[in-house]
Image (spheres, rainbow, N blue to C red):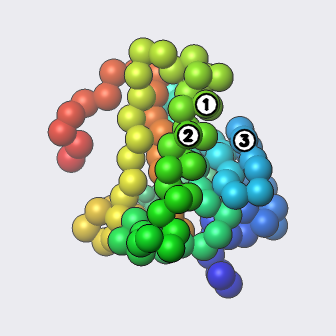
Amino acid sequence: MENCLFCKIAAGEIPSNKIYEDDKVLAFYDIEPQAPVHFLVIPKEHICCADAIDSSNSAIVAYIFEVIAKIAKELKLEKGYRIVNNCGEEGGQTVKHLHFHVLGGRLLAWPPG
Ligand code: AMP
Ligand code: ZN
């Protein structure tokens, strides 16, 4: 997808602080961390948002959650963490390529604003 920031990061055209990469997904630290640990996990395939998940592409979401659990163990987030997906304008999505935020390393308030 042209002019998609996260497609460019997935393709290595824009650098990122990578944590994990394979043929399907990439995990990298958020450039504006909102917690001591804040990283993003994206599919390499361009999917605009959670609202575009259907039976043809939902397997990648399950896989992303597997990768998150693996990384969380490596980063020693045993006290817990939060997985966030912002979807659409009112959901606060600014980058229109599906991504899951993983936040940890501090007590996180609930509900979010
Ligand atoms: P969202 O608001 O849910 O769409 O999240 C987009 C996230 O991408 C924000 O938390 C940004 O800080 C983060 N972000 C934007 N550009 C970059 C970048 N070049 N590298 C890493 N994270 C980024
Ligand atoms: Zn994209």
The residue at 31%/28% (across/down) is 108
Q: Which of marks 3 and 1 is nearer the N terminus?
A: 3
Q: Quadrant of residue 66?
A: top right
Q: Is residue 5 above or below residue 108?
A: below
Which class describes the residues within 10 Å of circle 3: few (<14), some (14-19), or many (20+)? some
Which class describes the residues within 10 Å of circle 1: few (<14), some (14-19), or many (20+)? few
Q: Do the residues labelled 2 and 1 touch (CB within 8 Å)?
A: yes
Q: Which of marks 2 and 3 is nearer the N terminus?
A: 3
Q: Are marks 3 and 1 in contact (CB under 8 Å)?
A: yes
Which class describes the residues within 10 Å of circle 2: few (<14), some (14-19), or many (20+)? few
Q: Is residue 96 visible?
A: no
Q: Residue furthest right?
A: 12
Q: Residue furthest front?
A: 55
Q: Dot 2 corresponds to which residue?
A: 66
* Drawn side of residue 96 relative to residue 30, left or right: left
- Residue 97 percent location from the top left of the image: 53, 68
Please name which of the two marks, 2 or 3, marks the residue nearer to the observer: 2
Amino acid type assigned to the residue bearing label 3 in the image: Tyr
Q: How far apart are marks 3 and 1 (CA)?
A: 10 Å
Q: In which quarter of the image is residue 79?
A: top left
Amino acid type assigned to the residue bearing label 1 in the image: Lys
Q: Dot 3 corresponds to which residue?
A: 20
Which secondary structure, mark 1? helix
The residue at 48%/16% (across/down) is 78
Q: Dot 1 corresponds to which residue?
A: 70
